[in-house]
Image (spheres, coloured by chain):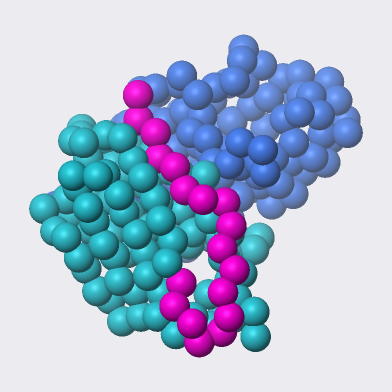
Chain colours: A blue, B cyan
Amino acid sequence: DAGVIQSPRHEVTEMGQEVTLRCKPISGHDYLFWYRQTMMRGLELLIYFNNNVPIDDSGMPEDRFSAKMPNASFSTLKIQPSEPRDSAVYFCASSFPSLGRGTEAFFGQGTRLTVV
Amino acid sequence: GEDVEQSLFLSVREGDSSVINCTYTDSSSTYLYWYKQEPGAGLQLLTYIFSNMDMKQDQRLTVLLNKKDKHLSLRIADTQTGDSAIYFCAEMDNAGNMLTFGGGTRLMVKP
């Protein structure tokens, strides 16, 4: 398996534009997480899904952020409209709870978003 | 709510031992983890410890868990320049689903 795949790796957009980040989890993993990483706030959990269903979106900063998981192999995080303060690295991770190891999350390479 | 805290920065000389500390608040955590993030990359699992253990050793890595004080540490023996990275501790919620990460400790190894 190629691991968790995120696209694009880098995105530069103008304030007010819509941004869509994509994630393909590891096949067979039933949990998917979206995180945001900034220097100021560290790593923040935005939302997570179990079996394609959003379980906890309390970390989503505001209504401009939305996430979907239409099937087990694809998820999107959308920001509309984007603002400069959304600039960060966004990570997608997937996991499959296994006996004896708890939950090991596998991370994608991240999407570095810059909103100018 | 759950909270995981780490110091921001640690600097050591090559060959010395590094000790990265972490405190957590959820006493029902069953697993605790250490992740490593190298520049420009995502986080990768380094090691984990089950909450009924006090210590786990894996080559140059030693994890110590003090459940009473809710304190977790990662010791890296004979630290190398390739160990320079950000290290995150994380606890798993008692449902076994969600990880809560600390803010990360940036380890700098000087030659």
Q: Position of residue B11 (x, y in %)?
A: 59, 68
Left or right, B13 with reference to B34: right
Residue depicted at 22% across the width and 40% down the height: B29
Q: Position of residue A50 (x, y in %)?
A: 32, 31
* Outermost residue, front side: B69
Q: Quadrant of residue A91?
A: top right
Residue A115 vertical placement versus A80 (above, below): below
Camera sees residue B59: yes
Q: Which residues are magenta?
A: B1-18
Q: Position of residue A116 (x, y in %)?
A: 88, 33
Residue A48 vertical placement versus B85 (above, below): above
**Quick one: B96 or B32, which is closer to the camera?**
B32
Q: Quadrant of residue B2?
A: top left
**Quick one: B66 or B76, which is closer to the camera?**
B66
- Is A69 within the magenta? no
* Outermost residue, left side: B52
Camera sees residue A97: no
Q: Position of residue A70 (x, y in %)?
A: 46, 28
Residue depicted at 31% across the width and 35% down the height: B25
Residue depicted at 24% across the width and 74% down the height: B57
Count of numbered labels shown in the rendering: 0
Residue A70 vertical placement versus B5 (above, below): above
**Quick one: B39 or A111, which is closer to the camera?**
B39
Left or right, B60 with reference to A74: left
Residue depicted at 50% across the width and 87% down the height: B15
Quadrant for the N terminus of chain A, please: bottom left
- Is B16 within the magenta? yes
Left or right, A44 with reference to A18: left
Left or right, B31 with reference to A116: left
**Quick one: B91 or A29, which is closer to the camera?**
B91
